[in-house]
Every structure is written in structure tokens, then in C-alpha cells.
Amino acid sequence: MSENGHLIWLIATAVMIILLLAVGTLAAAGLLGPDETTPAPVTLDDESEPAGGRR
């Protein structure tokens, strides 16, 4: 492998290690994934009663 090939390999490996550590840290802190404190969206069913009641 040429000298540039070794340098590219070294930089790519370093970037992958840094990303792995960053993602692992965020996951361990609970900062990845859906927000558990956000309420579920309100949906309207077709069978739900209108605001004024059934007519």
C-alpha cells in the first residue's frame, strides 16, 4: 500500500472510532431514540362522537 493509502486508512479508522465512542456515549446517556416524555399524538376515529353528541 502506498504512503497515501496508509494515511487514508489511519484517518478513516480514527474517524470510525470517534463516531463509535460518541454514539455509545449518547446511547448510554439516553439521548438517542424517541423522546419518552412526548405524549402520543391525538387521533380521531371514524366511530368517535362529534363534539355536540350523536344526532
Image (spheres, rainbow, N blue to C red):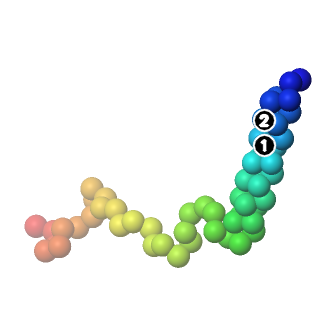
Write the residue at 13% across / 74% down: 52
Identity of the residue drawn at 75% across and 66% down: 25
Residue type indicated by callout 1: Ile
Q: Amino acid at mark 2?
A: Ile
Q: Residue at x 75, y 48 (%)?
A: 15
Q: Residue at x 77, y 41 (%)?
A: 12
21 on left or right of 42: right
Q: Residues within 10 Å of mark 2 (few under 14, many from 20)?
A: few
Alpha-carbon span between mark 2 and mark 1: 5 Å
Q: Which residue is mark 2?
A: 8
Q: Nearer the viewer, residue 19 or 42?
A: 19
Which residue of the protein is positioned furthest toward the top in this rendering?
1
**In the image: residue 53, left or right of residue 2:** left
Residue 50 falls in image quadrant: bottom left
> The residue tagged with tag 2: helix, strand or loop?
helix
Q: Is residue 40 left or right of residue 51?
A: right
Q: Which residue is mark 1?
A: 11
For the residues labelled 2 and 1, say whether their Cβ atoms are less than 8 Å apart.
yes
Q: In the picture, which quadrant includes the N terminus?
A: top right
Q: Residue 54, how many percent across, how many down?
A: 16, 68
Pinpoint residue 6: horizontal percent, then vertical percent: 86, 33
Q: Secondary structure at mark 1?
A: helix
Number of numbered callouts drawn: 2
Above or below for 15 versus 30: above
Q: Give residue 29's position: percent from left, percent from top.
A: 71, 72
Judging depth in this view, the residue of 30 and 52 nearest the camera is 30
